[in-house]
Amino acid sequence: MKKAFIFDLDGVLCFTDKYHYEAWKTVADKLCIPFDESVNDRLRGVSRMESLEIILSLGDKTYSEEEKIKLAEEKNGVYRKLLENMTPSNVSDEVRRTLEELKSRGYKLAVGSSSKNTPLILEKCDLKKYFDAVSDGNNIKHSKPDPEVFLKAAEFLGLGSGDCYIVEDAEAGIDAGKAGGFTTIGIGCAARYEKTDICINTFKDILQTAV
């Protein structure tokens, strides 16, 4: 029997897609690079620098590493300002009730997100109280699909990968979970991914797994 659930943050517990979109579009527009929802979808589950590389590949100019770092920092600055608009209302009652029920059943809960903005989002959304551990972009060297963020989360919980479920909405996250030896639960786009172990339609469906 599993002992814990490790959750991706964005797209699973809350949704900041619109903020990522606005921030990346601000940078892309400045560089005269076309940016729309289809491009934004390609950025799901990948790191900030990898996302920037995808966007720059759509233009015809070459940038130095220093310029790329400045562009990434510019995007993050816009994004963090937008995140200040987040409130506890950005998390659904369904998510909160499900997390509370999982804790009442004795499961340990953790967050496994590649984002360095995870602490800010958890604070703004009043989510920190539900979790026994948080692993994020501030304590890892490799982003998903590398399993490091999930392995660190399990380590913080004092458990092995075989003891934990991973809940993800992105294919890169499922790949990370599988690479780390975890059992994966996919929601959203990840529920249609052939490598996902367990597919769910709504967040509360997790409770059917936690028996």
Image (spheres, rainbow, N blue to C red):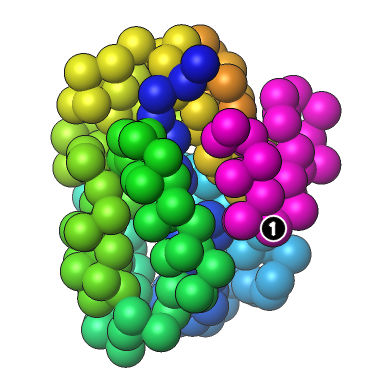
Amino acid at dot 1? Thr
Q: Is residue 12 visible?
A: yes
Residue at the (43%, 79%) spot, across then down? 90
Residue at the (82%, 28%) spot, across then down? 194
- Residue 69 image offset from top left, x and y in percent: 26, 53
The foreground one among 183 and 93 is: 93
Task: Look at the numbered disc 1 and give the secondary structure of its residue.
Answer: loop
Q: Is residue 42 visible?
A: no
Q: Quadrant of the C terminus?
A: top right
Asked if residue 86 lies in the magenta stretch, the reply is: no
Task: Using the image, determine if residue 36 lies above or below residue 84.
Answer: above
The foreground one among 125 and 23 is: 125
- Residue 51 image offset from top left, x and y in percent: 49, 51
Task: Using the image, determine if residue 147 lies above or below residue 8.
Answer: above
Task: Using the image, determine if residue 200 lies above or below residue 25.
Answer: above
Please name the residue that numbered disc 1 is placed on.
202
Residue at the (21%, 39%) spot, across then down? 133
Q: Which residues are magenta?
A: 185-211
Total label count? 1
| Residue extending furthest toward the bottom | 85
